[in-house]
Each structure stands twice: as structure tokens, then as C-alpha cells.
């Protein structure tokens, strides 16, 4: 089987194939032959359905730079590497029927992405920036039993929430949450504090982080200018990578968010689901002002 696989990939490399089918190969690891030398520079579509892959290589974009479609349906993938965000030409990504618990934020950098399939996984939340791409048309999230909320940017792009939002397990109760009416949404683990409409002053730590971020990005352009001992390690890492950006004004947020819940029945998608789900859309705002003025339809 190994020699047959190597031969298939070698032929694709020599003949500059644009499509490569590696379905039903019982692959437990990403084939090294695909990553050999310069990789497959002409490959545009890679099919690897029904295998036993658990992860993807960090240098995937470097070796397969022209991928337009990547099909990984029915594997055992738990983690998608940050390097996935470097597949700048990727338009279709199928990760359905895997074991995903987290989708890395870097997937939001795929500005050419049109179709994303994440059905039948173990997702608890989706990256807030996922829906920022103007090209993104459809995201399939059916049967993610722990998925309680969706970023507001996806409110008109999600196809199917059936099987999502089932009662949470006991172990999940430790996550920070907020409620609106009869709905309770559990926030990403990175969120440490929740702001409310009654909070008119941001915590000093949050104000300091936003000022530092603005100063270094606007004038110095390089956060490495900071001494490694100038901030606690946890805050220094946050400064490089904020929790997210406000859905209303795009201001970065570091230690606190102001969530706003939009039940599905209040969105244009309500008619598509016919009451089969309690999944809601969650917007993350940076202040009480943005919280009060943000609207999904604005």
C-alpha cells in the first residue's frame, strides 16, 4: 500500500496534476511524500476522505501553496494547525465528521474561503473573526452537540444548526457564561471577565492593554520592542494576540468582553430551522456604548 501511495503521489508531481485522490487509504499520518522537496506546487484539489488522520502538517501551505479545495471528511482530526491560515487560495475546506473541539482563529485569515464544513464534530464555539471574509458563503455546523452560540458575523451564512446546543455536560459548567431570558451561553475559555450595561468604566488593566496595543501598532509597528519582563507573560501574550475585536467598532479586547445574545428566532435565518435548535448568535463588544448600539442587521 505504501509503495502504491508513493507511486500515485510521484506521478501527480511529475505530471503536474491539479487533482489528487487519496480517499479510503487508511492513512494515519499525512503522507510525507506530499511534503517532499518542493511539494506539489500545481495541486489545487486534495481529497483525503475516510482515513484516520489526527492532525495536519505545519508546512502544508508551503508545500501545497495553490490548494483551492481540501477535503478531510471522516478522519480523526483533533487539532488544525495555525498554518492553515496561510493557504491563501483555499476556497473550500471540509472538516466534517472529525473530532474537532477547537477551530484555530487563524482560519479567519482565509480570505478566499467560500465553503466551510464543520458538521459532526465536538466544537464548543467558533472564532469570532471567522465570518469577516467577504467571500465566505456557507458554514455547515450541524451536530456539534456542545455548540451553544455562533459569532454574529455568521448569522446569515450558517447552514444547519440541527443537533447543536444540547444540554451541557457538568464539566462545562466551570466556563464563564451569561444568560439572556431562558438562554445561557458559555463563552470561550480565554474570556476572563464579562462587562454589563451598568459598567461605564473599563478596568485599568484593560485600558492599559488597549493603549499599549494602539501605541505599538500605530507608531512602532513591532511589539518585540517591549522588554520580555515589562509585562507578566500572560499579558504579553495577550498583547500580541487579543481575545478578539469588537463587532461594532473593531477595537481589540484583552481581558473583558461585553457579550450580546441574539436568539435565532430574531434573525433572518429563523425560518430555515423551524424551531429545531436553540443555538444563538453572540456578538462581542468592547464597551457599553457598542453593546447598546450593535445590531445584527445594521
Image: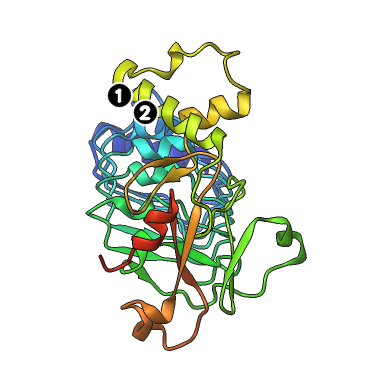
- When the figure is inspected, residue 7 is found, relative to residue 234, above or below; the finding is below
Is residue 120 in view? yes
Residue nearer the viewer, 94 or 169: 169
Q: Residue at x 35, y 28 (%)?
A: 62
Note whether 55 is above or below 122 in the view shown: above
Which quadrant of the view contains residue 289?
bottom left
- Give the SS element for disc 1: helix
- Give the number of callouts: 2
Colour setting? rainbow
Residue 124, percent from left and from top: 58, 59
- Image: 288 above or below 148: above
Displayed quadrant of residue 28: top right
Q: Residues within 10 Å of mark 1 (few under 14, many from 20)?
A: few
Q: Position of residue 141 (x, y in %)?
A: 46, 67
Q: Are marks 2 and 1 in contact (CB under 8 Å)?
A: yes
In the structure shown, which secondary structural element does the residue marked by tag 2 occupy? helix
Q: Would residue 94 be visible to someone looking at this image?
A: no
Q: CA distance from mark 2 to mark 1?
A: 6 Å
Q: Position of residue 236 (x, y in %)?
A: 55, 24
Q: Residue at x 46, y 74 (%)?
A: 161
Q: Residue furthest bottom?
A: 274
Residue at left offset 55%, top offset 62%:
121
The mark found on residue 53 in the picture is none
Viewer-side residue, 33 vs 212: 212
Q: Which residue is mark 2?
A: 214
* Residue at far right of view: 170
In terms of image quadrants, where is residue 9? top left
Residue closest to the eye, 112 or 220: 220
The mark found on residue 218 in the picture is: 1
Amino acid at each position: 500500500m505504501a509503495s502504491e501511495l508513493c507511486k500515485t503521489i510521484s506521478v501527480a508531481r511529475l505530471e503536474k496534476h491539479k487533482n489528487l485522490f487519496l480517499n479510503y487509504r487508511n492513512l494515519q499520518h499525512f503522507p510525507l511524500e506530499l511534503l517532499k522537496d518542493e511539494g506539489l506546487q500545481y495541486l489545487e484539489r486534495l481529497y483525503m476522505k475516510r482515513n484516520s488522520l489526527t492532525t495536519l502538517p505545519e508546512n502544508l501551505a508551503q508545500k501545497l501553496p495553490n490548494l483551492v479545495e481540501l477535503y478531510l471528511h471522516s478522519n480523526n482530526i483533533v487539532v488544525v494547525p495555525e498554518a492553515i491560515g496561510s493557504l491563501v487560495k483555499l476556497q473550500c475546506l471540509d472538516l466534517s465528521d472529525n473530532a474537532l473541539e477547537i477551530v484555530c482563529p487563524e482560519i479567519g485569515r482565509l480570505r478566499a474561503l467560500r465553503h466551510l464544513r464543520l458538521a459532526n464534530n465536538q466544537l464548543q464555539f467558533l472564532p469570532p473573526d471567522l465570518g469577516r471574509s467577504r467571500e465566505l458563503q456557507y458554514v455547515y455546523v450541524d451536530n456539534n452537540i456542545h455548540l451553544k452560540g455562533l459569532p454574529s458575523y455568521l448569522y446569515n451564512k450558517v447552514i444547519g444548526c440541527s443537533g447543536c446546543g444540547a444540554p451541557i455536560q457538568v464539566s462545562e459548567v466551570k466556563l464563564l457564561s451569561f444568560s439572556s431570558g431562558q438562554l445561557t451561553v458559555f463563552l470561550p475559555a480565554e474570556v476572563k471577565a464579562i462587562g454589563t450595561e451598568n459598567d461605564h468604566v473599563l478596568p485599568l488593566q484593560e485600558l492599559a492593554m488597549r493603549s499599549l496595543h494602539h501605541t505599538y501598532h500605530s507608531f512602532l509597528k513591532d511589539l518585540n520592542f517591549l522588554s520580555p519582563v515589562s509585562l507578566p507573560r500572560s499579558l504579553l501574550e495577550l498583547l500580541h494576540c487579543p481575545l478578539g475585536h469588537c463587532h461594532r467598532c473593531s477595537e481589540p479586547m484583552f481581558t473583558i468582553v461585553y457579550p450580546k445574545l441574539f436568539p435565532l428566532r430574531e434573525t433572518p435565518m429563523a425560518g430555515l430551522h423551524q424551531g429545531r435548535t436553540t443555538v444563538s448568535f453572540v456578538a462581542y463588544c468592547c464597551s457599553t456604548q457598542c453593546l447598546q448600539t450593535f445590531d445584527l442587521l445594521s
